[in-house]
Image (cartoon, rainbow, N blue to C red):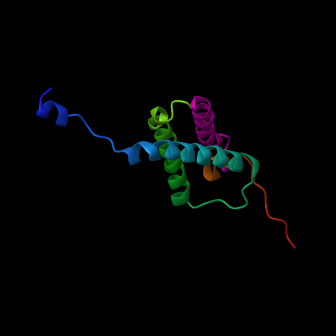
Amino acid sequence: MSEEAHSATPVVSDRQQQTAPAIFYLLSAILIGLFAYRLLVPVHAMPSPTERNLTIIFDVLMVAGLFGMKRRAPNAQALFWIAAAAGVGLLLLRTTGVTGFWSGHLRFTYLPRN
């Protein structure tokens, strides 16, 4: 094998290989936790249009990143599918009505007056 052919292969450092599964696990935990929070905790105030748009974009990018990181942790396929379902659930919460579209939460309640 020549020197040129050997140097043309990409070199992935050990540090990148070690941190990639950690990022996958962190992203999965964030998606699952955020879905549980938005499903169980009612919202008390509607966000601004800018905040609404940024959270939608953030949710879409997290789901896309999860699918992009699928190969990084081949032994965690169950976690991948749970996190993927949670990510799709985050986007489906936006279709539950006007309140869901604006807040991303399932329910809306007013704060109690003292």
Main SS category, magenta section: helix
For residue 13, say whether it is visible.
yes
- Asked whether 62 or 25 is in front, the reply is 25
- Asked whether 65 or 111 is in front, the reply is 65
Is residue 41 on the magenta stretch? no
Q: Quick one: which residue is furthest to the right in this view?
A: 114
Judge left or right: residue 34 versus residue 41.
left
69 versus 1 height, above or below: below
**Image x and y of residue 48, in percent:** 57, 61
Number of numbered discs overlaid on the protein picture? 0
- Asked whether 18 or 49 is in front, the reply is 18
Q: Which residues are magenta?
A: 76-99
| Residue found 41% across the figure and 42% down from its top | 17
**Image x and y of residue 18, in percent:** 45, 45
Picture quarter with the C terminus: bottom right
Where residue 49 sits, quadrant-wise, is bottom right
Judge left or right: residue 15 versus residue 99.
left
For residue 94, say whether it is visible.
no
| Residue found 78% across the figure and 56% down from its top | 109
Q: Quick one: which residue is furthest to the bottom in this view?
A: 114
Judge left or right: residue 36 versus residue 12.
right
| Residue found 48% across the figure and 33% down from its top | 70
| Residue found 69% across the figure and 62% down from its top | 45
**Image x and y of residue 59, in percent:** 54, 46
**Image x and y of residue 12, in percent:** 32, 41
Picture quarter with the N terminus: top left
